[in-house]
Image (tube, helix red, strand yellow):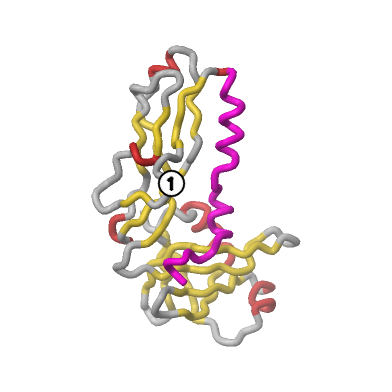
Amino acid sequence: MEYRIKALNRGNENPTALRDAGKLPGVVYNRQENYKVVVDLKEFNKVFMAAGIHHVITLEMEDGKTVDTLVRQINLDKRRRRPDHVDFYALSNEPVLMWIPIKIVGTAQGVREGGVLQRVNNDIQVKVSPKAIPPFIEVNVSTLRIGDSIHADELALPEGVKLAMNARDTIVAIVPPEDAEKLAAQAAAAPTEVEVIKKGKTEEEK
């Protein structure tokens, strides 16, 4: 599925006036370029709710040019509870760091035996070419028994996708019911989508 937003080049317009008019100021950047843009706030919210940080968002510029991007940072207006600035990372042919959601496949044997399946990480960080970004990474849990787990380096990654996080980070585990609460607390400490976008630019992109 494609995600597209109309964008205009932004000059020296007052950002506050743009926000009051229902617009969202932003920048488009990579190692070679950096320029200001503005998008419609409602349109951005709608598209970002569907695409998040996991999918490419194509900016349709007024001159007919299109720019494939990933949302890298969103500044929030806490008083109005809405975005007030967005950073779009312009994709090229170079591999990019990004978070890919996991998809659980199968029913674990340990669950049939009374255990609880816990997702410790909902996403994994990878380095991948923009043209080869997978929509998700499958995690087959069918053979897991109580006490078993799957770590990041045990995942079957598609060709061209390289792991870019701690190899021994736990992705899923099958735990006894009495341990489920403890592991849930660990999962809560994992990076959320909001935390990821607040990290801003990676060292690779600066």
Label 1 crowding class (10 Å Cα cut-off): few <14, some 14-19, many 20+? few
Q: SS for tag 1?
A: loop
In this rendering, the answer to whether 59 lies above or below 82 is below
Amino acid at circle 1: Asn
- Compare residues 12 and 134 and report the one nearer the observer: 134
Question: Residue 145: x percent and y percent?
Answer: 40, 19
- Name the spot of residue 199 as percent of width and height, x first: 56, 60
Task: Kindly identify the residue that appears in the image at 47 percent across and 55 percent down.
Answer: 53
Left or right of 1 on screen, residue 178: right
- Quarter where residue 85 is shown: bottom right
Across and down, in percent, residue 177 comes to: 56, 18
Q: Residue at x 61, y 34 (%)?
A: 185
Specify the quadrant of the image occupied by residue 156: top left
Task: Work out whether 67 lies above or below 116.
Answer: below
Residue 194 % position (x, y):
58, 53
Residue receiving disc 1: 166
Along the viewing direction, whichever of 152 and 33 lies nearer the viewer: 152
> Who is closer to the viewer here, 161 or 103?
161
* Residue that protrudes farthest toward the top in the picture: 113
Left or right of 79 in this view: 51: left
Residue name at image x 41 percent, y 49 percent: 100
- Residue 132 vs 87, above or below: the answer is above
Residue interval drawn in magenta: 178-206
Q: Is residue 189 magenta?
A: yes
